[in-house]
């Protein structure tokens, strides 16, 4: 499907805040033109070594960030997540995945280490981001290994860490990934019975400049 058709959905506002030491990413003008529900705010920060892109939707969701320039294959996971936030309907690989996400025992911080050219990395990062689109307790960072470096225990891309512990490596499917996260949670503490979608706090976009659609970068 062409990008214009993919982003042509009736959607709620999605706000993106990109911070970085240089001008905004070059792909934003095209996405802004295709998606009327999309807003971008760019904050230039020369103290940062690389870009950070954070996404905010109108409904309950977890924190979602890309650390390092979003390029090549990873643009696909960004676009998929923007669309899911706008229309509120992630495109799941399996029908029961949302149930499995809702059955997680508590919040979890996921770090997904990727290469921008790796086709497996984009599938795993997109899956992790889908979890965060429906669960406010799931926080996801997509980290470019060549920019952010790797923790000493990580030797394969993609690798997913849950609260700092490796839960998946290589081409894990959507269902494998959520089951591995659930297994990790069960292994470290008794079940709490917490439903993330009903109890965890949601990330909110700053109120300032909410109506601005275009970047303020020169």
Image (tube, rainbow, N blue to C red):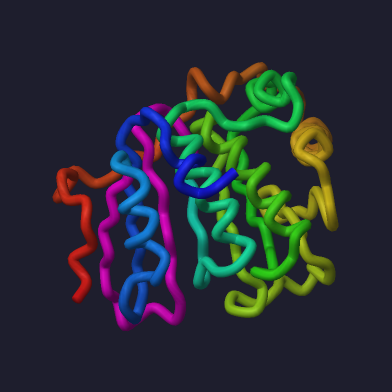
Q: Quadrant of residue 25?
A: bottom left
In the rendered view, tell whether residue 40 sits above or below residue 1: below
**Residue at the spot x=72%, y=54% of the render?**
161
> At which x and y percent is residue 218?
19, 76
Considering the image in quadrants, where does the N terminus appear?
A: top right
**Left-right relation of 85 to 125:** left
**Left-right relation of 9 to 163:** left
In the rendered view, tell whether residue 113 sits above or below residue 64: below
Q: Quadrant of residue 85?
A: top left
Residue 169 vs residue 185, the one in the foreground: 169
**Left-right relation of 97 to 202:** right
> At which x and y percent is residue 89?
53, 26
- Reply yes or no: does residue 61 show up in magenta: yes
**Residue at the spot x=48%, y=28% of the render?**
200
- Reply yes or no: does residue 50 show up in magenta: yes
Q: Quadrant of residue 52?
A: bottom left
**Residue at the spot x=77%, y=74% of the render?**
152
> At which x and y percent is residue 151?
71, 71
**Left-right relation of 185 to 86:** right
In the rendered view, tell whether residue 101 sits above or below residue 144: above
> At which x and y percent is residue 71?
55, 69
**Residue at the spot x=75%, y=53% of the render?**
165
Which stretch is magenta?
38-62
All told, the count of numbered labels is: 0
């Amino acid at each position: 499907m062409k990008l214009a058709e993919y982003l042509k959905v009736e959607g709620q506002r999605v706000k993106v805040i990109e911070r970085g030491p240089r001008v905004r990413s070059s792909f934003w003008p095209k996405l802004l033109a295709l998606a009327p529900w999309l807003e971008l705010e760019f904050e230039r920060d020369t103290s940062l070594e690389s870009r950070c892109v954070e996404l905010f939707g109108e409904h309950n969701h977890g924190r979602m960030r890309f650390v390092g320039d979003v390029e090549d294959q990873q643009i696909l996971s960004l676009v998929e997540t923007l669309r899911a936030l706008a229309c509120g309907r992630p495109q799941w690989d399996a029908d029961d995945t949302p149930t499995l996400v809702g059955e997680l025992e508590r919040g979890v911080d996921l770090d997904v280490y990727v290469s921008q050219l790796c086709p497996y990395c984009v599938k795993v990062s997109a899956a992790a981001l889908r979890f965060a689109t429906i669960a406010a307790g799931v926080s996801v960072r997509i980290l470019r290994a060549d920019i952010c470096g790797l923790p000493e225990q990580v030797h394969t891309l993609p690798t997913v860490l849950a609260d700092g512990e490796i839960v998946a490596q290589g081409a894990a499917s959507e269902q494998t990934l959520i089951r591995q996260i659930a297994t990790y949670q069960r292994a470290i503490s008794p079940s709490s019975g917490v439903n993330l979608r009903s109890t965890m706090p949601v990330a909110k976009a700053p109120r300032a400049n909410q109506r601005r659609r275009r970047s303020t970068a020169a």
